[in-house]
Image: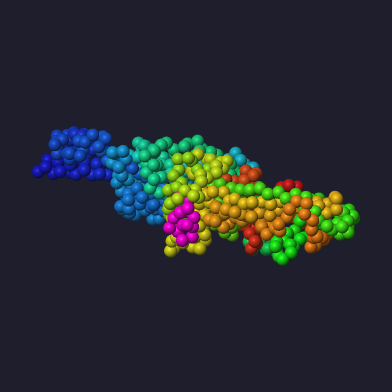
Amino acid sequence: MFRQYHRKLCTAICFYLDRRTGARTYRSASLCCAHYGSDLGACSEATLPKRSLHSEQDAMIRVLNVAEKPSVAKEVSRILSNGRAQRRQSAAPYNPIWEFGYNLGGQQLEMVMTSVSGHLMELEFPLSHRAWRSCAAVDLFAAPVVRSVPADKAPLKRNLQQLSRQAQWLVLWLDCDREGENIAFEVIEVCKKANTRLVIKRARFSALIQSDLTRAMANLGPPDEAASRAVDARQEIDLRIGAAFTRYQTLLLQTKFDWQAGGIENDSPLISFGPCQFPTLGLIVQRAWEIQSFVTEPFWEIKVGYKAPNGKGACDFHWGRGRLFDHAAAVMLYEPCVDNPLATVLRVEGQERRRQPPVPLNTLEMQKKATRELRLPGERIMKLAEELYQAGYLSYPRTETDQFDPGYNLRAMVAEHVHDARWGAHASKMINGTMFRDPQRGGHDDGAHPPIHPTKHSAGEADWSPEKRKLYEFVTRSFLATCSLPAIGFETKITIGITENEIFHTTGLMVTERNWLDVYPYAQWGGNSNLPHFTEGQTFMPSSIILNESRTTPPPRLTEAALISLMERHGIGTDATVAEHINKQLERGYATKDAAMTFAPTALGEALVGGYRA
């Protein structure tokens, strides 16, 4: 009876191992019983399940898949399983597990999908250097640093290690940028501690759509350690510089001022410093100083107006000399024009003009244009774009690329939108061949992701906020515009002379074919299209000739779009962090932003920059 019970027990164990690990179970009773310390002769190979005798190629492989966020894990599982993935709870309450089968080139995989929540590890100084007064600030530049999983991420670590023990492959579905690559190696480090035999594979994708994800599964490759090490280096530099200067200036200044009298609520504020945060503040302060130091000056210019008889057009002519800063000289030139005002048309020039559509959107261009057109802060734009990406409506929103690969089926993307009530008519013209044109190629390609574009059509989901609807519409209209024909217009330039010395000119543009402008309401083109009809040699009497006095104006305060452009020019931050650095100025009380979305430094922000420049 004991032998019969033992055979049943061994059979059950082999079935269990086969199911849990996806590996081959023990091929012989001797090995099986030896492994469990049993009587070597107690069972025979005949008692083992037939599945354990299959070849390695036929065995089910158990694959642990890890995404960067729970929403991405859910969407990848839904798409790869055709909606059949089963959900269960994990050791991390907010990061569930999804299970489903998948066939990869004839090999059956048992897929287990879970996620982390951004970075799994953090870089910190050891306890001996963590207290602010434990060492001099300068010592932090040479102090040791440790990378570990913080206490609040312990459930994520436990979840990964539990699943790793049962897996043979680890497939990394982290975002395909440097930061995602770094998180991938954090996941590898945690999982390898539980199972050193894991086979590591990287899935590379740009959008949460069927074609991208199946292509990623078919082309699994190794993760990029060099990209991860670059992030390690940046994190360490940021930590050392940020911690050293933050401690230094906070401890130096925190008790020396009446902060509440200066408009700061906290009487012991944290006066932080960051290697990208402070240069950003420097740009805001520099513009404020340029405005403060600006000295306004008067200038004069002659303006000529003309209204054709019977209301057949009107225009203003601009002085060929531009503007003069010498009033006496301006008067000397103006008086002969008033004494002898008859104007003669010297030249009438006309030519066709084309306005090209915008290049495809990358992250910085999306932030610059959307902040201006949608009146939303950059950080909010990036958050909404990330949500749309995770829901499968936009491609990956952090990309430097502004040119589509020739292999992209752009017409198929356009076809998604032909039934939309807002831009469907334009999309239909593109599909019918009368409006479509391959987009212009910008000057950037990060080699990882395409430009930002819609991945599927939506008329606006029920749970979308008005801001999210606007951003989706902006990206979609931008994409359709980039694939459309250029706008065409006819420009007319009129040059006239009054007396023998003074030349004036005006220009009018009549748009004859709007093309991409029809689907992109954020751009305007054309103007002064109601020009009177002029012929060369014609003479006419102007309706008005005035000497107009104006004053120079200081440069405007920085808008968010202008600040992003300056940061891009000076290499401050990355496409993914620019919005964060700008928002940090507001959080720390270093700058303010008004209703017109322009920035000005606070007294604290200006004083800090002035202190370092002194």
Q: Residue furthest left?
A: 1
Name the residue at the bottom extreme: 310
Horizontally, residue 305 falls left or right of residue 72, namely right
Image coords of residue 554 (percent x, y): 75, 55
Quadrant occupied by the N terminus: top left
Residue 303 vertical placement versus 185 (above, below): below
Question: For the image shown, how many numbered marks are present on the structure?
Answer: 0
Q: Nearer the viewer, residue 114 or 462?
A: 462
> In front here: 469 or 120?
469
Q: Residue at x 72, y 61 (%)?
A: 314
Closer-to-camera residue (260/458): 458
Query: Which stretch did the figure color magenta?
Result: 417-431
Instruction: Judge whether residue 445 can be spotted in this image.
Output: yes
Magenta stretch: residue 418 in it? yes
Residue 467 appears at what percent x and percent y? 52, 61
Residue 191 locus on image (x, y percent): 39, 42
Rendered residue at 61%/54% (across/down): 511
x 63%, y 48%: residue: 353
Q: Position of residue 447 (x, y in %)?
A: 50, 39
- The vertical placement of 517 against 244, above or below, is below
Looking at the image, residue 523 sits to the left or right of residue 226; the answer is right
Q: Indicate the quadrant where residue 204 lies.
A: top left
Q: Is residue 131 magenta?
A: no
Between residues 349 and 384, which one lies in front from this camera angle? Answer: 349
Q: Image point 50% across, 36% down: which residue? A: 226
Residue 568, above or below 468: above
